């Protein structure tokens, strides 16, 4: 019997030594909590900042994420549609009190029947397009500058120039085609359009409706308004939920509906390892973990929940100074969350996930030990059985 034991030891001991030597090479889903926290970058790579997620860090990051609302930057005042612009088509109607002298031989418009009944004579001039010089021509009044002026101002100037030539002239101007007071709608809409603005005061959602609506889901669509040399974007869902963001439009506005598929990647000891899309409105870390299936009880380390991200250099006061950056000027950072601390569950509800974040949950030390023991028994047990069989 002692000889058999010695023979077993001569076989099993080298096997155990080899297993212990190679335990560091066992397959794993990623670094452990300790490796993430204490790991050093390879030569030529940036130093990784490890930051504990608490209320102060979350508040500072949220403050930097805040974007101005349409109601704050674009205001609630729309465009005055009485302003005439280049390319507009205008119709000039001139009335003369009897006895009409200047336009007596002109053809009377059929719409002036009511005026004719009172003895007044109306003349409708041929439709004119406001030229590149911003003027139109009126017989006996000459070239009238109209671009950038109101309808009432132009009517007054024409009547003034005709005074003394026509008998008590009255002028009415009508825009038959609006080419200057328009907005353009492009992007992920059913049909890109150039929409004229009217006196009713069209708003953002009116323009999107005129374009046939958006082609992508509302919760994945961002709306950008370009006004002059500035632009601003908001999730379409925000505009729909908050009526104040459905702002009045102005001439020259360009509305772009953007489909922005945002996503994060879940790795490690989560319910599923995959890229997960989320809404343009954004999600929190708590929501991200829930969509990833939560933490796996048999594998996860509740102390080791991490978010890998590239942040702007001025985002936080970095623990390792000076911070090194990537060629794009971003700081590699790992946000660390301890889910065994109950306060972390409140912080997670405010910590926002960015596009292309990596949410990683480390394996627990017990899970790594269990894998090692399973490997040992899967090798030692057949050898032990073989030895007993050969006795």
Image (spheres, rainbow, N blue to C red):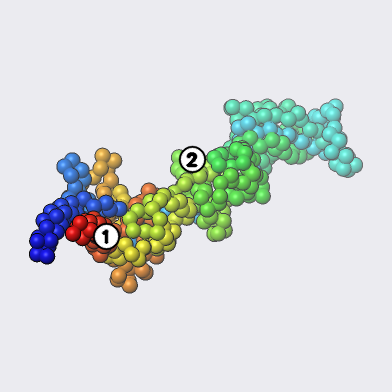
Residue 94 visible in image: yes
Q: Residue at x 16, y 54 (%)?
A: 15
Q: Which residue is drawn at 63% across and 35% down?
A: 179
Decide which of 285, 14 is in the foreground and name it.
14
Q: Where is residue 69 in the image (x, y as percent from the top left)?
A: 47, 54
Q: Position of residue 188 (x, y in %)?
A: 55, 42
> Quick one: SS at disc 2?
loop
Answer with the quarter of the image where residue 50 lies: bottom left
Q: In this view, does 265 lie above or below 180?
A: below
Disc 2 and disc 1: Cα gap in Å? 67 Å
The quarter of the rendered structure image containing the C terminus is bottom left
> Quick one: SS at disc 1?
helix
Q: Where is residue 312 in the image (x, y as percent from the top left)?
A: 29, 49
View extreme (bottom): residue: 342
Q: Is residue 236 left or right of residue 383?
A: right
Q: Is residue 76 left or right of residue 347?
A: right
Does the residue at mark 2 contact the one at mark 1 (Cβ under 8 Å)? no
Q: Mark 2 points at which residue?
A: 228
Decide which of 249, 191 is in the foreground and name it.
191
Q: Mark 1 points at which residue?
A: 374
Decide which of 122, 209 is in the foreground and name it.
209
Going from the N terminus, do you reach mark 2 or mark 1 first?
Answer: 2
């Amino acid at each position: 019997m002692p000889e058999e034991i010695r023979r077993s030891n001569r076989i099993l001991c080298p096997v155990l030594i080899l297993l212990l030597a190679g335990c560091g090479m066992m397959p794993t889903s990623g670094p452990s909590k300790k490796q993430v926290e204490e790991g050093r970058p390879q030569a030529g790579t940036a130093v990784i900042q490890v930051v504990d997620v608490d209320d102060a860090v979350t508040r500072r990051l949220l403050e930097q994420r805040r974007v101005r609302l349409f109601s704050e930057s674009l205001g609630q005042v729309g465009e005055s549609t009485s302003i005439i612009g280049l390319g507009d088509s205008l119709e000039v109607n001139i009335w003369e009190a009897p006895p009409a002298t200047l336009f007596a031989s002109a053809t009377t418009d059929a719409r002036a029947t009511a005026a004719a009944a009172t003895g007044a004579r109306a003349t409708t001039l041929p439709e004119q397009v406001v030229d590149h010089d911003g003027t139109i021509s009126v017989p006996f009044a000459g070239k009238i500058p109209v671009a950038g002026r109101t309808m009432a101002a132009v009517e007054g100037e024409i009547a003034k120039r005709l005074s003394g030539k026509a008998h008590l002239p009255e002028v009415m101007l009508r825009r038959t085609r609006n080419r200057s007071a328009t907005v353009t709608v492009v992007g992920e809409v059913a049909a890109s359009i150039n929409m004229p603005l009217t006196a009713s005061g069209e708003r953002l959602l009116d323009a999107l409706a005129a374009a046939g609506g958006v082609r992508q889901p509302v919760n994945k669509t961002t709306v950008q308004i370009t006004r002059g040399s500035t632009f601003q974007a908001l999730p379409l869902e925000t505009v729909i939920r908050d009526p104040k963001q459905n702002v009045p439009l102005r001439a020259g506005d360009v509305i772009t509906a953007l489909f922005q598929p945002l996503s994060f990647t879940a790795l490690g000891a989560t319910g599923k390892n995959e890229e997960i899309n989320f809404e343009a409105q954004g999600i929190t870390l708590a929501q991200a973990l829930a969509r990833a299936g939560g933490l796996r009880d048999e594998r996860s380390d509740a102390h080791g929940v991490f978010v890998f991200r590239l942040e702007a250099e001025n985002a936080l006061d970095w623990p390792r100074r000076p911070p090194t950056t990537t060629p794009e000027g971003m700081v590699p950072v790992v946000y660390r969350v301890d889910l065994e601390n109950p306060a972390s569950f409140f912080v997670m509800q405010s910590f926002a996930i960015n596009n292309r974040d990596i949410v990683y949950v480390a394996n627990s030390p017990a899970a790594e030990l269990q894998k090692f023991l399973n490997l040992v028994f899967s090798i030692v047990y057949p050898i032990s059985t073989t030895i007993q069989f050969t006795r």
